Image: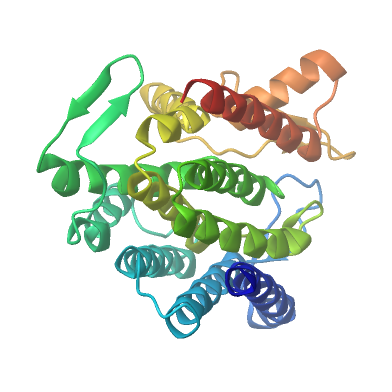
């Protein structure tokens, strides 16, 4: 039993400390080398280190590699390692894509259609091992057998959707990290309850690394996550859902992101390519950037202004976290 406990705990410790150490070292380097961005939800628009989430992903990768090594050398087993390596490959590829986008810059990065196409292609690690169960339990529909279309079509669509959608609901101190913990934590717990213990372990490794990242990313943020983080965590969420056959559960968890997509399309129909940021005043209270609601973040600003007569960045993040917690409870009850 002590071997299993050791294998469960050591990767968590490593992922946390690798992430923490690298991010702490990166922040002054980023300022010195000019890898900084403006914090748009602050009145004075302070400069904050960019691409910090990359090091959280590196922490996850190191944690997973240690987990693999401990299983092979201590437990003398290769059970589930093909699936684990497919996750590791997918995470690495989508993170590289996000890093490429980060380096090109906020306004000059990959075009939306390029992101969609590339994330579709990057699902290959899961496609080639024909992962998942072709029988999918969908909300309101029931069980559907997709057959060979599942690994060849449904899997890449899922990865494309989760990686790009997770990147859409962002832009506030602590938001992406908090949502990552809630989403990965939920599928990790469900994986444990359905005896997919390797997926539960990968989820815990991810959570510990994100916690280290949030130490620096929480309000007031010293570092931003970047697309390398959002693409990576989004694709990892999709991979766990697929490998754990948690499609219905995952779809329910992703309700806020479906709403974000609907609001984004609403903006396009009104000729608005929306930004999630609010408009801060001298006291860093936010107001909506548009007359209409084009993002969940805009909705959170409006809700807080209606109820509390003001909306701060932390209030917006807490509101979205609360909404996600409610959705998560619903997913456990009905997913």
At horizontal 47% and vertical 70% (from top left) the residue drawn is 103
Q: Nearer the viewer, residue 165 or 33?
A: 165
Please tell me in which quadrant of the rendered image residue 128 appears: bottom left
Residue 68 image position (x, y, % from top left): 45, 76
From what the image shows, is residue 165 above or below residue 27?
above
Horizontal placement of 109 versus 128: left or right? Answer: right
- Residue 294 visible in the displayed image: no
Residue 260 image position (x, y, % from top left): 49, 30
Where is the N terminus found, in terms of image quarters? bottom right
Q: Nearer the viewer, residue 102 or 234?
A: 234
Residue 236 image position (x, y, % from top left): 44, 55
Q: Residue pushed farthest left?
A: 148
From what the image shows, is residue 243 above or below residue 98?
above
At horizontal 78% and vertical 14% (from top left) the residue drawn is 306
Residue 136 image position (x, y, % from top left): 26, 32
Horizontal placement of 39 versus 335: left or right? Answer: right
């Amino acid at each position: 039993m002590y071997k299993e406990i050791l294998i469960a705990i050591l990767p968590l410790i490593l992922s946390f400390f690798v992430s923490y150490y690298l991010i702490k070292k990166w922040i002054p380097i980023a300022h010195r080398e000019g890898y900084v961005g403006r914090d748009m939800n602050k009145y004075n628009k302070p400069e904050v280190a960019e691409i910090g989430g990359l090091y959280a992903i590196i922490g996850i990768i190191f944690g997973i590699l240690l987990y693999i090594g401990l299983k092979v050398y201590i437990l003398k087993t290769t059970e589930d390692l093909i699936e684990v390596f497919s996750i590791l490959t997918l995470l690495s590829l989508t993170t590289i894509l996000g890093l490429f986008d980060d380096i090109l810059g906020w306004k000059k990065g990959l075009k939306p259609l390029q992101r969609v196409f590339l994330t579709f292609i990057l699902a290959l690690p899961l496609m080639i091992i024909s992962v998942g169960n072709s029988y999918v339990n969908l909300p309101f529909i029931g069980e559907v057998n997709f057959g060979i279309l599942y690994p060849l079509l449904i899997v890449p669509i899922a990865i494309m959707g989760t990686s790009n959608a997770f990147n859409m609901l962002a832009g506030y101190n602590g938001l992406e990290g908090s949502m990552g913990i809630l989403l990965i934590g939920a599928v990790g717990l469900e994986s444990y309850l359905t005896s997919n213990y390797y997926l539960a372990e990968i989820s815990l490794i991810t959570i510990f690394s994100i916690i280290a990242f949030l130490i620096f990313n929480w309000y007031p943020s010293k570092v931003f996550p970047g697309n390398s983080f959002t693409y990576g965590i989004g694709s990892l969420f999709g991979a766990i859902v697929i490998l754990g056959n948690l499609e219905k559960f995952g779809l329910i968890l992703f309700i806020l992101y479906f709403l974000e997509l609907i609001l984004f399309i609403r903006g396009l129909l009104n000729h608005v390519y929306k930004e999630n940021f609010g408009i801060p005043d001298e006291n860093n209270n936010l107001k909506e950037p548009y007359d209409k609601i084009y993002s969940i973040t805009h909705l959170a600003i409006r809700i807080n202004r209606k109820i509390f007569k003001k909306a701060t960045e932390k209030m917006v993040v807490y509101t979205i976290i609360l909404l996600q917690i409610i959705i998560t409870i619903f997913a456990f009850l009905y997913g």
